[in-house]
Image (cartoon, rainbow, N blue to C red):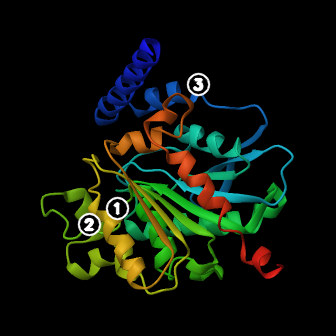
Amino acid sequence: MRHHSCWRKLLSQVVLLGTILLLNGCEASLFAGLNTTDRRAGIDTQKGIVFDAPHQLKLDVYRPVGVEHAPVVVFFYGGSWVRGERAWYRFVGTAFASHGVMVVIPDYRKYPQVKMDGFMEDAARAVAWTHEHASELGGNPNDLFVMGHSAGGQIGALLATDPSWLAPYGLRPKDLAGFIGLAGCYDFMPIDPSDKDMLGMFGRDEASQARAQPVRFVRGEEPPMLLLQGTTDHEVDPSNAISLAHALQAHHEPVTLKLYPGVGHIALVFALSRPLHGDAPTLADTLPFIHAHPSASLVASH
């Protein structure tokens, strides 16, 4: 027991160190170290696939070897819409691929290069690319989930609520098998007038800011949702997940909200890495959700 206690204390220190590194802009070193612990056996990885040639945007695919018609997750990472790289989140791809789920992790343009319309268009294009190519990669395009952490949660949730983003590709939010949000930003109005980056991304007036709020678009046409949130999150207030869950419930949409006591913002996603699984049941709660929502084509065949 003493050895176990020391190990847990060490892992908690890793999370604290991670928070410090993130705040000081040392993300690359942190994620590189974390990714050295991931699983690779039985996983085929394809890196650097161009899905948007005009903007030279690329994605990485993690797929279980020998599996066909696998459920597919498109994961959007966080970073306050201003930073982040797909390679940092290899541990997310391998965590799910080791359990039979194909994962696609795309990059997207950040602020100030683009505002909200830019990164949302990139995200929609990545989902459309995945839907088009899933079968040839061994995945099931009808079992396509969107998942995101923090700012990536806001991006994924907008795709799952506001039909305008996927419409150019002939897709609807309801065509998604589900949305999985990890501490996402779903209801964050009004924006602090002193936050110049947020105002630059989402606008200063109420109508512009409302376009960024997934909770404003819930109308009863959404896919099933799983919302995971730590109660000690000091980056994204838990009220975001609670608000979205209430909006979905009001429209009788299937939603599961899980609040994790004592779990912070970074710990929620870091729990997908091998050494930090014990910090939150992120993977343990997400996998049953994925497998409990089979594709429309499979449902129709039974």
Residue type at numbered disc 1? Cys
Is residue 298 found left or right of 159 in the rendered image? Answer: right
| Residue 114 versus residue 49 in the image, above or below | below
Q: Tell me which residue sits at (77%, 45%) in the image.
A: 64
Circle 2: element type: loop
Q: Earlier in the sequence, mark 2 or mark 3?
A: 3
The Cα–Cα distance between marks 1 and 2, rounded to whole angstroms, is 6 Å
Most extreme residue toward the front is 1
Q: Are marks 2 and 3 in contact (CB under 8 Å)?
A: no
Circle 1: element type: loop
Q: Tell me which residue sits at (58%, 68%) in the image.
A: 178
Q: Position of residue 227 (x, y in %)?
A: 44, 61
| Residue 98 seen in the current view | yes
Q: Position of residue 278 (x, y in %)?
A: 48, 34
The Cα–Cα distance between marks 1 and 3, rounded to whole angstroms, is 29 Å
Q: Tell me which residue sits at (48%, 50%) in the image.
A: 77
* Residue at the spot of label 3: 36
Q: Are marks 1 and 3 in contact (CB under 8 Å)?
A: no
* Residue at the spot of label 2: 188
* Residue at the spot of label 1: 185
Residue type at numbered disc 2? Phe
